[in-house]
């Protein structure tokens, strides 16, 4: 299967994808702020977490399902064209994420991952409780 747009258009589209202040990240920030949590943005820690909660020793990454390969998620489909490139690139993202989580754990941080498809209010209330509890995390 070939791409539905030409190479220049695809390149322009991919270049326009933001790494910070994405809609899922803004939803998470608003929800957690509403729950009374105060945080720092894009901390100068390994992996540059999206949210840092120094008071609770916790960091939050808001991951795009496609880019970070959310298991069993419909948004994590591999593109049909240039499969070898995409497989390699996306697997490297997953490996880098794992290294980052291990490094943060080693520094004493609790690491939480919020997937773009799971940014609803109920999920954010649950996350807020886990951050405030001071126990556990959900990154391997």
Image (spheres, rainbow, N blue to C red):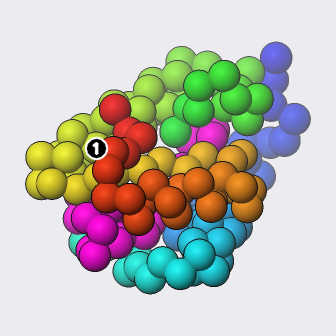
* Disc 1 element: helix
Quadrant of the image containing the N terminus: top right
- Please name the residue that numbered disc 1 is placed on: 101
Q: State left or right for residue 83 relative to residue 101.
A: right
Disc 1 residue crowd, few under 14, some 14–19, many 20+, Cα 10 Å = many
Q: Which one is in front, 136 or 16?
A: 136
Question: Which residue is located at x 44 percent, y 82 percent?
Answer: 38
User: Is the residue 122 above or below the residue 36 in the image?
Assistant: above
- Image x and y of residue 29, in percent: 58, 74
Residue 22, x across and y down, in percent: 63, 67
Q: Is residue 60 magenta?
A: yes
Write down the region rendered in magenta: 45-67
Residue 101 seen in this snapshot: yes
Q: Residue furthest right?
A: 4
Please identify the residue farthest to the front as the structure is shown: 133
Asked if one can make out residue 14 in the rendered structure from this viewpoint, the answer is: no
Q: Residue at x 42, y 50 (%)?
A: 112
Residue at horizontal 52%, vertical 22%?
A: 87
Seen in the image, is 41 located left or right of residue 12? left
Q: Residue at x 70, y 29 (%)?
A: 73
Q: Quadrant of the C terminus?
A: top left
Q: Is residue 63 above or below residue 82?
A: below
| Residue 79 position (above or below residue 39) | above
Residue 123 sits inside the magenta stretch: no
Q: Quadrant of residue 59?
A: bottom left
Which of the pair 133/122 is nearer the observer?
A: 133
Count of numbered marks: 1
Q: Is residue 122 above or below residue 37?
A: above
Instruction: Please state which of residues 127 and 11 is positioned toward the viewer in this rendering.
Output: 127
- Percent position (x, y) of residue 14? 65, 53
Q: Position of residue 80 (x, y in %)?
A: 74, 21
């Amino acid at each position: 299967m070939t791409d539905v747009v030409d190479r220049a258009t695809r390149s322009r589209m991919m270049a326009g994808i933001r790494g910070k202040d994405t809609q899922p990240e803004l939803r998470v920030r608003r929800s957690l702020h509403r729950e009374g949590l105060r945080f720092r943005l894009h901390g100068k820690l390994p992996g540059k977490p999206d949210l840092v909660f120094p008071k609770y020793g916790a960091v939050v990454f808001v991951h795009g399902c496609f880019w970070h390969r959310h298991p069993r998620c419909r948004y994590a489909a591999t593109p049909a064209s240039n499969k070898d490139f995409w497989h390699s690139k996306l697997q490297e993202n997953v490996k880098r994420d794992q290294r980052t989580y291990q490094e943060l754990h080693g520094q004493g941080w609790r690491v939480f991952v919020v997937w773009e498809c799971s940014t609803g209010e109920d999920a954010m209330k649950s996350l807020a409780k886990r951050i405030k509890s001071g126990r556990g995390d959900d990154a391997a």
